[in-house]
Each structure stands twice: as structure tokens, then as C-alpha cells.
Image (cartoon, grey):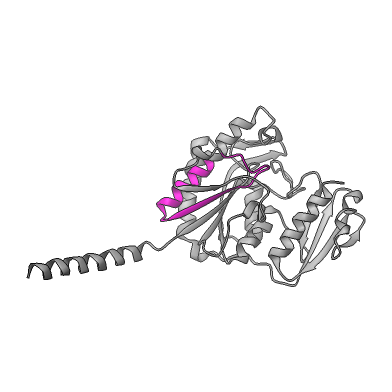
Amino acid sequence: MIRKKIWLFFVIFAVFSYLQAGDKAPLKVFISVDMEGIWGVVHYNQTSSSSSGYGAARKWMVEDVNAVVAGLLEAGATEIVVNDSHGSMRNIIADDLHPKASLISGSPKPLVMMQGIDDSFAACIFIGYHAKAGSASAVLDHTISGGSVRAIKINGIELPELGLNAAIAGYFKVPVIMISGDTETCRQAKSILGNKIVTVAVKEGIGRYAAKLLPPEEARRQLKEKAKEALLKKDKISPFKLNPPLSIELELHRSSQAEMPLLVPQVKLINPRTVGFSSNDYLEAFKLLRALIALASRS
């Protein structure tokens, strides 16, 4: 009789444990973090490892990210992957990152700012992003390479980095649910990704090298609360997808920068400083685009 009771106890315990585990289904979130849109950053000398302002900016960068991670955990995230996405992609000091988050660090990486994304993630967040090249009242505006890229258009629509990267998330059917940066970056995000995306403007651009910053504690409070809000409403936000056939145009600053990209057979000259190509697969198109930018940067 005692053995039967013990056996029954273990059966009930096993069933209860299974049901409890079922309540905690994996909820993975991918974070891509750039630096120009981080709270406090207003100049290039804060984003370069060779400059004196870089140390403080690294600290602000991880503080922005940690605030978001804390909000995501409160909303039920079970796994968070952070991809360091600026410059050398070795900006975040690993042991300063929230202990519940994993870090992807270093470069080169095949998917660059989106390395690590796949269809196992429930949502994607962009932290510290910036506006596209040529934007007014936007801090450190550029598109991928400030020295070479004037504009990138896909099917006739000019896209900033946030749009190009959101399309990678969309390729894997993952929605971008939140973005932080300056006010213009947030405006561009809503214009491209839709009004349901949650935005946090941690600063208001006055010019390319000046901004009005939120008080630091308020910025981190908003990042945490908005991250929580965004994850709780993730099912209301659709992935951003670019449907094939895709026509990609890369407009460069100088005609000489178009010369090296033309060595790639499928790339055509559209005008003296613009090259283009077509593709039916966005991931392949993105990788070719990055290769063309690398070639252009050598001219």
C-alpha cells in the first residue's frame, strides 16, 4: 500500500512538473545594439575606440541595453541574445552586460548587425539606432558607411539601417517590436515599420552633432518600461518583409566608388555613382549589398 502511494505521488509530481514547464514555453528575444543612438552620444569621438569619449559611451551603451533586458525579463522573456552591432562590434564589455543575456561580439559576421537571428525568436529589438544618411536634425545620421553610402533603395524605397535590418528579421518571420534612438530615428521607424512599433526617443536631435538628452534615469526607466510593453504586445506587430523580385540600388558619394563594385558580374551601372542588381532572395541580396559597400569603400 505504501509503495502504491509513493508511486502515485511521483506520477502526480511528474504531471505537475510537465504542466508547469508547459506554462514556460521559450520566449526568445534578439537585440541588435548600435552606438550612435545611445543616450548621451552626440559626436563621432564618442563612438571610436581611439577617442577619449569612447569609454563613457561604452558605459552608456550597456546601461541602455541592461534597462531593456530588465524590462524583457519582467515581461516573461526566457532567453535574450544581444548582438553588438557598432564598428568593430566589440564595444560592450561582456561582464558589464546583464547576467541573463548572451552576447555576440566581434566582427566580421555574415549577417553583421543581425548576426544570430533566426526563426526561433519571438521578437527583435533595435537599441541605439540612428537615422538614414541625409536626415535633418538627426544625430550622426548615415547608412552603413558614412564615407561611401549616400542612399540604399530597394524596389524604389530608400531605407535606413533599421529598415534593412528589420527585413532580415522579417525574412525569419520575426517582428521588430521596439527601437530606441533620437526623435528622427523613431519617426523613420514608424514610417517604415508601422505605427504599432514601440519607440523610445532618448534624445532630440538639434543637429548632426548636438542633441537635447532625456535625464539619464528617465531614459533608462522608459527603456525598461517600453521593452516590457513591447514584448507583451508582440503578437500585434507584424514582421517587416520585402517581397521579391527585389531591385537594389546603391548610391555612392563619388563616381570612383562605383568602379570596384562593377567587377561583380550581376552588378550594373545605373548612373555614374549608382550601381544596382536584382535578386529573388533578400538574405542573398543583403550579403551582396554589404560586399559591394566594402568594395566601394576601397575606392
Q: Is residue 142 magenta?
A: no
**Residue 93: x, y in percent?**
55, 37
User: Which of these two is toward me, 255 or 119?
Assistant: 119
Residue 158, can we see it? no
Q: Say which residue appears at 50% left-offset and 48% top-offset.
A: 102
Q: Say which residue appears at 49% left-offset and 38% top-offset.
A: 95
User: Which of these two is toward me, 138 or 88?
Assistant: 88
**Residue 6: x, y in percent?**
14, 66
Residue 9 horizontal side relative to residue 272, left or right: left
Q: Say which residue appears at 55% left-offset and 34% top-offset.
A: 59
Q: Is residue 65 magenta?
A: yes
Residue 91 horizontal side relative to residue 295, left or right: left
Residue stretch in magenta: 64-92
- Tell me where residue 76 sits by quadrant: bottom left
**Farthest left residue?**
1
**Farthest top residue?**
52
**Residue 282: x, y in percent?**
70, 66
Q: Say which residue appears at 70% left-offset and 44% top-offset.
A: 138
Residue 38 horizontal side relative to residue 21, left or right: right
Residue 15 horizontal side relative to residue 102, left or right: left
User: Which of these two is toward me, 139 or 94?
Assistant: 94
**Residue 132: x, y in percent?**
72, 50
* Number of numbered discs visible in the structure rendering: 0
> Quadrant location of the N terminus?
bottom left
Q: Is residue 173 above or below residue 59?
A: below
Residue 89, can we see it? yes
